[in-house]
Image (cartoon, coloured by chain):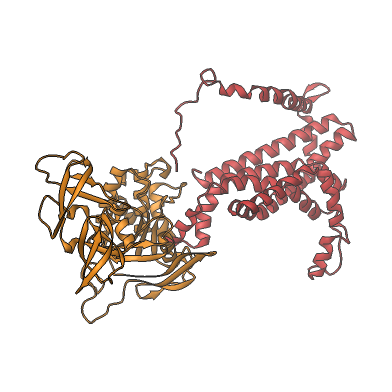
Amino acid sequence: MGQALGPRNGAVGRVVTEAFLDIQAAEKSFGAATVLGGVDLKMAAGEFVSLLGPSGCGKTTLLRIVAGLLAADRGTVRLDGEDITAKPPHRRDVGVVFQNYALFPHLTVAENVAFGLKARKRATSDIAPTVKRFLELVHLTDFADRSVRALSGGQQQRVAVARALAVGPKLLLLDEPFSALDRKLRETMQIELRRLLRELGTTAVFVTHDQDEALTMSDRIAVMYEGAIEHLATPEEIYRRPATAFALGFVGLSSRLAGTVVSDEQGVVTVETAFGPLRAAGNFVAGASVMLAVRPERIRVNAPGDYALIARLRDAVFQGSKVQLHFETRGDDQLMVETADLADGVPAPGTEMKLGWAVSDTLIYPAP
Amino acid sequence: MTTRAVPSHAPSPWRDPVILLAVPAVLYLLVVYAYPLLWLLMKSFTGPSGLTIQPYISFLSDPFNWRVVGNTLRVAAWVTLFCFVIGYPAAFALARAGTVVQIVMLVSIILPLSIGAVVKAFAWQIVLRRDGVVSQLLVGLGIWDEPQRLLFTETGLVLGAANIFLPFMILPIYSVVKLIDPRLSEAGATLGATPLYSFTRVTLPLTLPGIVSGVAFVFSMSVSMFVIPSLLIGDRFQTLATLTGRSFLLMRNEQLGSTTAVILLALAVAIVVGSTWLARRLGGNT
């Protein structure tokens, strides 16, 4: 790490280090349907980037292009300074963990892990220790001689990870590797995989449609929609300042109020909404239709904020450590609050409450 | 990938009456198949003075008969090999084709089965003549200097028989290929395996059960074919099956006929069982 494109230190300094993975203007169409419309993505060595988006957004297509399993119509892929656009997959040094794992059903666990080493003609004396080491890393030492068909989903997933990592690929691609696992197992595996990749210093691209997974694991997240990257940033940045209304809606919950800009002074606009005039930082001309958004946990209940509005509670959902409050709104507006401190307990529906939040927490987007 | 439950002991037919559904088929086979076969076997071991192995000794001591056994096995081996070489790739094309193409291909494979071997053999007579399509094509390509007759040659027999038995090679392999996840080859490639390496280490072992059934089908059918050699090569070339037929139909020699029939059966069973066993061993746990 510590390169110009490092996860959290941005492109500072004058020395421009070449990106470890550099995808430029990748385009792909199937017939008349454009699946990828010129995607750029640069990654530093050791970085973990998630491609997050709904199905059909092009994330798996992009992954397959990087792996060499699909040829892009246009664009280049460079890995570790080398143009690999035209290379076949078996000469790319790019490992893949497939969604259904794609384990070799006729081989044992150890033979699956050894497959890539044998295919690459590693010295026989090297293969056994390497297989042993990677089976230890994924806690499957006792299963070495079992058939992969006799394993549970979580164990198969670990075999797939060990198999892909054993050859020491320059880049690891993961295509929704946890989607077949139940929630609890998935959370354990996420943490385990992240730790393993960090230990090995593996650069990884992770495809998922699960925002929690992306937020938990990634150094950076690329939110994809309709064949384009809408926002590429750290999980925190994506959550706090989503670049587009799509990114806002796809990652996390939000309160959303439609309105019209009534005045614009030095980058702060006043917007007339169903709850009265509200302010937000942004450059919009008077008369523009906009949408204001606030993350629900940034809204204070019965406390002073930059402004306060009165709303009537529709219902309250008790979620243990926090309470989710939904308020009555008009049209497509949504007003929800997540709060941990309700001194007088969960209020009854119909209660009128005073809500407030900071101008700096207010996000503003052109009306969808 | 589902985990296959392996029962620790076979269920008793009394507790699992599903097995009783096979009773009609078993009875039928006993009457029309096992009984006559047993009769043949008895016949071949029965001489004028009771039990004897004399028919086998006299059969095996005649060099002509060894040539017949050789002809039988050689032709069957060539037919099986030819069917495998063109049927294996075709099975992949069939399994990976789009729905419409797949239906068209399946129909064009299965429909010819409804045309009897006699009709097809006569059609091949036209193709294999001196002025037939094959001869003209080979001359046109410069492979042959002058037109030749393929009809009534062993090559012609192999070509014709392979045409008729090809579906029995393609279909079992197809049914196995269809079950193989296409991602496996991709996984092989991303692990650094060349297409050839992935093929020999992944695809081939996984298709082995299909190959074994295809080979068993085609081999046992070509060992025992009677109509096709009669029409495509004639009496000069005898196989165990044609010799059996001649013994019963022309020479009225039931003893010789039963002996050759039993030898034919033993050979076919030995080779089919042997190749299955070999394939299982080579393929590991497939």
Q: Quadrant of the N terminus of chain A?
A: bottom left
Q: Is residue B284 left or right of residue A177?
A: right
- Shown in red, the chain is B
- Give residue B190's quadrant in the image: bottom left
Most foreground residue, B43 or A185: A185
Q: Is residue A45 visible?
A: yes
Q: Is residue A157 left or right of residue B16?
A: left
The residue sitting at the right extreme is: B250
Q: Residue furthest top?
A: B14
Residue A347 x, y percent position in the rendering: 16, 40
Residue lying at 41% horizontally and 51% vertically, measured from the top left: A101
Please report the residue visible at 87 percent of the width from the left and 55 percent of the height from the top. B126
- Of residues B21 and B266, which is closer to you in this image? B21
Q: Is residue A230 above or below residue A15?
A: above
In the image, is residue B64 above or below residue B146? above
Look at the picture and state if A286 lies above or below B53.
Answer: below
Outermost residue toward the bottom in this view: A14
Q: Using the image, determine if residue B246 lies above or below residue B187.
A: above
Query: Which is more toward the observer, A155 or A121?
Result: A155
- Percent across and percent down for residue B284 are 49, 45
Give left or right: position of B200 versus A344.
right
Residue in the picture at 55% in, 52% down: B204
Q: How many marks?
A: 0
Q: Quadrant of residue A299?
A: bottom left
Residue located 74% across and 37% down the image: B264
Viewer-nearest residue: A115 or B124:
B124
Q: Position of residue B56 (x, y in %)?
A: 77, 33
Can residue A170 be seen here? no
Chain in orange (letter):
A
Which quadrant holds the C terminus of chain A? bottom left
Determine whether, in the image, residue A233 is placed left or right of residue A101: left
Residue A237 image offset from top left, x and y in percent? 23, 63
